[in-house]
Amino acid sequence: MKNYYRIMLGKKSVHAPECIAGKFIGADYGIHQDLKDELAENWRAFNRKFIPVFLENNPGKSRSAAGLGCGAIWMVSKGIVGDDIILCHDGKGHYHVGEVDGDYYYQPGDVLPHRRPVQWLSQTIERADMSEALKRAAGAAAAVINISPYQDEIEKLIAGVSAPKLVVTDETVEDALAFAMEQHLEDFLVRNWSQTNLGKEFDIYEEDGERVGQQYPTDTGPIDIFAISKDKKTLLVVELKKGRASDVVVGQTLRYMGYVQEELAEEGQSVKGIIIAQEDDQRIRRALAVSSSIEFYRYKISFKLVKA
């Protein structure tokens, strides 16, 4: 089955012009060796071998940074397969669209040396034409994001047909209006993080000064907000209910916490979760009664006019 990915070609896609002109996508992350015979069938095996290499080559970087970097290399080199569709932002409001049409090759001494050949299409997609959900998914800071749930919308955009602005692709969503509202709440929460109670104790996760903790990628989907305590001892998974059934969002949060514990946590770090919703109910209270590592927060929206 064809998949769809948003690729960041260097930090903020700075190398997009070279990749488009050279008909390739690529990755770097300081691993300078030919990986042709090292690309395991799954990213976990690759990460187990190359996270230590990454950390040795990038002193001072965290295990989380190593996991993101190695995962991106594996996805570009192996995980993305022939005929998959690539979207790459050029920093000017356009997404270039390409189709992967060959296997991994190594180009030492050049930018993004771990490469795949790509046939770039003549069509581009305007960010302004995307639904809000696709904008947010494609705008995540991670180097590689699977945006396959938006296949129908992407194909329409490639064909020049604008999509409706409210698009919900997750079958676990019960309330589309709440989903849309809480998407905006997430952006508001991130922008005003330092003013919240959570911001007094936690910082949204950053790499190289860039916030990568919003829509942080995992192997079971993106974490809404991934944060770390100011003393670096606790990793925090924050999930907004986003119109889902209460028991679904509790299970989802626990899966993300398990990923963080197994793949990202350093020795001595603990993991906790927080669910944020407009209101709780009996299902969420029952589920959280046996989930002591997850806390629940309600949000309130207020609006007022002030005469000038």
Image: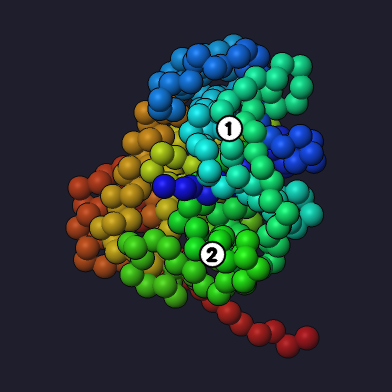
Q: Residue at x 60, y 44 (%)?
A: 99
Callout 1: few (<14), some (14-19), or many (20+) C-alpha neighbours within 10 Å?
some
Where is residue 167? Give x, y as percent: 49, 69
Q: Which mark is residue 197?
A: none
Q: Which residue is mark 2?
A: 153
The residue depicted at 64 percent of the width and 46 percent of the height is 98
Q: Circle 2 sits in a helix, a strand or a loop, which is it?
A: helix
Query: Image height check: is 156 above or below 304?
Result: above
What residue type is disc 2 on? Glu
Q: Position of residue 83 (x, y in %)?
A: 53, 43
| Image x and y of residue 275, in percent | 38, 55
Residue 22 sits in quarter:
top right
Is residue 119 rendered to the left or right of residue 72?
right
Picture colour scheme: rainbow
The residue labelled by disc 1 is: 102
| Disc 1, SS | loop
Residue nearest the observer in this picture, 80 or 179? 80
The residue at 62%/17% (across/down) is 31
Left or right, 79 with respect to 102, comes to left
Q: Residues within 10 Å of mark 2 (few under 14, many from 20)?
A: some
Q: In the rendered view, does 300 fall on the left or right side of 93?
A: left
Amino acid marked by disc 1: Gly
Q: Nearer the viewer, residue 69 or 229?
A: 69
Looking at the image, is mark 1 or mark 2 earlier in the sequence? Answer: 1
Where, by quadrant of the figure, is residue 169 drawn? bottom left
**Considering the image in quadrants, where does the C terminus appear?**
bottom right
Instruction: Judge whether 139 appears above or below 228 on screen.
Output: below
Is residue 215 left or right of 175 when viewed as pictured?
right
Q: Nearer the viewer, mark 1 or mark 2?
A: 1
Question: Quarter-wise, where is residue 154 in the image?
Answer: bottom right
Residue 211 vertical position relative to residue 135 in the rendered view, above or below: above
